[in-house]
Image (spheres, rainbow, N blue to C red):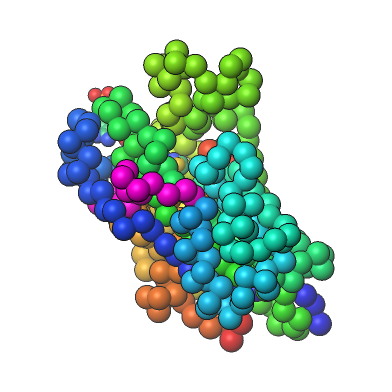
Amino acid sequence: MTTRAVITGTGRYVPPRVVTNDDLTQWMDTSDEWIQQRTGIEKRHWIDEEAPVGTSDLGLEASKIALERAGWAPEDIDLIIFATLSPDLFFPGSGCLLQHKLGLESTPALDLRQQCTGFIYGLATADAYIRSGMAQRILLVGAEVHSTGLDISTEGRDVTVIFGDGAAAVCMEAVETDQAVGVLGSVLHAKGSMAESLKTDAPASREWPRLTAEMMAERRHFPHMDGKAIFKEALRRLPEVTKVILKQTGLTKEDIDLYIPHQANMRINQFYQQMMKLPEEKVFHNIQRYGNTTAATIPLALDEAFEMGLIGKGSTVLFLGLGSGVTWGANIHRFPE
Ligand SMILES: CC(C)(COP(=O)(O)OP(=O)(O)OC[C@H]1O[C@@H](n2cnc3c(N)ncnc32)[C@H](O)[C@@H]1OP(=O)(O)O)[C@@H](O)C(=O)NCCC(=O)NCCS
């Protein structure tokens, strides 16, 4: 018998406020046509300006659903892994805030800052903890509140139209089995030389002081992206990492029931599908409804794919993504029969 890390519950939560592409035109020079053509996005959810909530609040709602589906009480969790690039506070991490909101007193909480690849790094980390015996039940959360940090003027339109707020969570459990189930493999990468191509560089501990009116006037507290460089890198790395993980796990691309890529741009994922010669229905998209929710996109898509009946018991799913860092990677997970 081998210890395997198996996903036993999923949940998602997005704030109720919907912001359509047309809504964005009141603040910036953009159009529904441009956004849909270039990205596939039709709308996204943003938190309510009048009653703002934090990333851990969205994570809490998603976690409650995942816990219920896994049949766990919060006390059953022996590690929280929280992936986000938009933590509630500069520090401490959102994992600690979530731990308290779950009513827990000393359960460890680990934050991951891997941006769009946060869930992929998180799944690999949870798998390593479980297989080493360091944890038996892990709550892995991907959550973001982007809306409070976006430049909603025309100057920021290339980035702002892409991002949405949202959260999703999975419960991961140690299962003793002879079957090849749970996380079958993970491949992780980073390329810090491309760090400048997608970043928010203020407040910054390398500046003295960390945030000034001048920095804000230069809009350095908003995200900036070299969209073309990221696009190009994604089209190189996503097929590459897919081939590596299939080889590593001894699987073929036909063995995968559903490919769940990070939702950064529908065109990237459509090119990926064509480059990999995959049938259209095997590559999941939900960017139309949510935009890019960064660390939340993959678990959010997983939860929806379950609900839509696209996957179920026995399904093999490949997760993959690339984002700021740049970081990229993939995991394969098989659900038990
Ligand atoms: C952001 C992205 C959609 C922009 O698409 P693009 O085809 O590269 O567009 P460009 O940046 O070249 O801009 C083309 C034109 O549209 C304009 N434009 C940019 N954003 C716009 C918007 N929201 N509405 C209307 N016009 C816009 C630009 O100003 C530019 O105008 P110009 O030709 O007059 O200078 C695309 O680069 C992308 O998706 N990149 C990858 C994003 C990603 O994966 N990020 C990682 C995870 S977060």
> Could you tell me residue 110's position as x and y percent?
68, 52
Compared with 296, 161 (above or below) is above
Q: Is residue 16 magenta?
A: no
Q: Residue at x 22, y 40 (%)?
A: 24
Magenta segment includes 48: yes
Q: Is residue 262 visible?
A: yes
Mark count: 0
Residue 110 placement, left or right of 202: right
Q: Residue at x 49, y 71 (%)?
A: 65
**Quarter holding residue 33:** top left
Q: Position of residue 156 (x, y in %)?
A: 33, 29
Near-viewer residue (27 or 249): 27
Relative to 101, 230 lies left or right: left
Q: Nearer the viewer, residue 162 or 236?
A: 162
Magenta residues span: 41-55
Nearer the observer, 80 or 306: 80
User: Which secondary structure class fits the magenta region best?
Assistant: loop
* 93 to 5, vertically: above or below: above
Residue 242 in the image: state x and y as whole percent.
57, 56
Name the residue at the bottom extreme: 337
* 53 and 80: which is toward the camera: 53
Viewport quadrant of the N terminus: bottom right
View quadrant of ligand 1? top left
Residue under the image location 58 percent in, 81 percent down: 71
Q: Quadrant of residue 126?
A: bottom right
Residue at image point 37% right, 75% down: 308
